[in-house]
Amino acid sequence: MHEFILLPCPFCGSEAEFVRFGSKIPYDVIRCTGCYCQTDAIIGGLKSGVESWNNRVTYGSPAPVQKLKNERGAGRKPKISDIDKQRILDFVSRGSSYRSTAHYFKVSLGTVHKLINEHEKIV
Ligand SMILES: [Zn+2]
């Protein structure tokens, strides 16, 4: 019927076929004979439909998936919230000593130093 070569279904590997729908306004799709996945209605000639059916990302070239950093959410939970970090920076910028700030927020003096250092790098 057609001179086109249809690649097998990208999902199940079964043969594909042309199927005509509609009586008044007929349209064709290319459909898998196994799982019945199909193209959209082919407009602009069967050749364009064949091209879209045949040009798929399959055959050993799965689309690259960007991996999330720290996918499992591994590691220690942050000791202090972002809000507290901001408040600590506020305290220090208003003249509170590192030591009394650390005491107030129940964190170590080192933590306050670290926060200030990180903040100064950003600013
Ligand atoms: Zn299929």
Image (cartoon, rainbow, N blue to C red):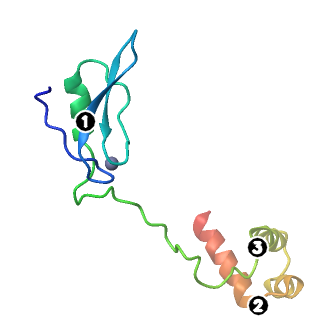
Mark nearer the N terminus (3 vs 1): 1
Q: Residue at x 69, y 79 (%)?
A: 78
Q: Quadrant of residue 26?
A: top left
Front position in the image: 44 or 4: 4
Numbered mark located on residue 81 in the image: 3
- Please, what secondary structure does the residue beneath circle 2 have? loop
Numbered mark located on residue 17 in the image: 1
Front position in the image: 16 or 63: 16
Amino acid type, callout 1: Glu
Mark nearer the N terminus (3 vs 2): 3
Amino acid type, callout 3: Ser
- Please, what secondary structure does the residue beneath circle 3 have? loop
The quarter in which the C terminus is drawn is bottom right
Q: Which residue is mark 2?
A: 108
Amino acid type, callout 2: Ser
Answer yes or no: disc 3 within 8 Å of ligand 1. Answer: no
Q: CA distance from mark 3 to mark 1?
A: 59 Å
Q: Is residue 14 above or below residue 103?
A: above
Q: Is residue 20 above or below residue 70?
A: above
